[in-house]
Amino acid sequence: MGKMKNIIDKSQYDVLGLLPCPIKVPIEIGFDEMINNLESECDFKYLVEGNANYEVMWMDESSYIPKKEELPKIIISAGVNSFYRKDFRAKAIEEKYFKEVKSIEDGKLIENDFSDPKGNYYIIALNHLVMAVDLTKLNNRNIPTSWGELLNSSFKKEVAIRGKRGKYCETTLLAIYKDYGMDGIMKLKELVGFGGHPAEMVKNAGKGIENSPTISVIPYFYARLLKNNKNVKIVWPEEGAIVSPVTLLVQNDISNMLENVVNYFTSEQVQNVCKDAALPHPMYYLEYLKENNYKLNWLGWDFISNNDINKLLPKLNKCF
């Protein structure tokens, strides 16, 4: 294993796609095919990669806000990351860094809670978190059916969330804070005894292993790998599965050649890849939820506008 390359030289690429693990390979393959089918020589530099290798987005740790020309022309990133920072959003929106990408399905414009009212951010896929409960460790306790029940439960130090000390899953922390305030975060702190990658949590679930979590908060993509495991119950919480968005940002002034890239990332081909990997486009999701009566717990644009995410997250992480 080479050393992880944490910081990307942002001026190096015109297109930067940092993708969640489950969709990385098929999207990369489709992207390469699209490049090979271009009528003329590709004149832009690109990196399409799994985001796990690049923990640090450019501005996470500093107060520096990149100028428009310092950013790739097209960016795909996962989670509520530093592009959602209040100061970055204010500058990018005011100075019109990005243009609106519209989702037109069957000639209809799809408007939903995930459509950015200001038209800068386009969500191409929803990663959503549910609970996986290890039944071998329940000891006659009730299974929580909601985030609220989990927070008020007796599972002290028995819960796992993605991440490690100082850097836990931002959407979990923000969603709990949104609904239950600092009080909810303090309750969560008492419950969390494990961090790490969801793949590890899935590997140990339902095996009665000592020193492994009773309840893991994991993406549905990983949870569904456990659906035939009779020692595990998957709980879709009543207030909704917590949503982590995969976001597309497209600068205003892009070349015709780069329009091909935008068309690819908003294409049915990519939508199908995401859907198959259980990270569907909002449009598919809302249809599915209508039929199945499940909810999604999305922070929402008001929360994002009203909170200074990059100051709030370190404060929430510090509790752990």
Image (cartoon, rainbow, N blue to C red):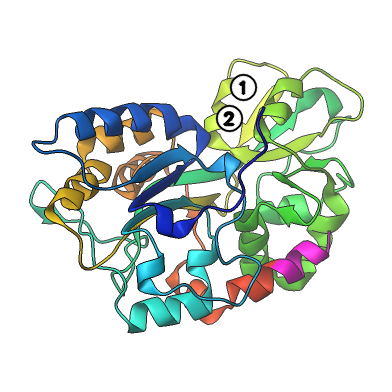
- Residue shown at 43%/82% (left/top)? 90
Q: Nearer the viewer, residue 157 or 78?
A: 78
The residue pinned by badge 1 equals: 226
Q: Which percent across, then down, holds residue 135?
A: 77, 25
Stretch in magenta: 314-320
Location of the C terminus (image quadrant): bottom right
Q: Amino acid at mark 1?
A: Leu
Q: CA distance from mark 2 to mark 1?
A: 8 Å
The residue pinned by badge 2 equals: 222
Q: Amino acid at mark 2?
A: Tyr
Snapshot quadrant of residue 112: bottom left
Please tell me whether the stretch drawn in magenta is mainly helix, strand or loop: helix
Secondary structure beneath label 2? helix
- Residue shown at 59%/30% (left/top)? 223
Q: Is residue 143 left or right of residue 227?
A: right
Q: Which percent across, then down, holds residue 126?
A: 43, 46
Up/down of 17 relative to 178, above or below: above
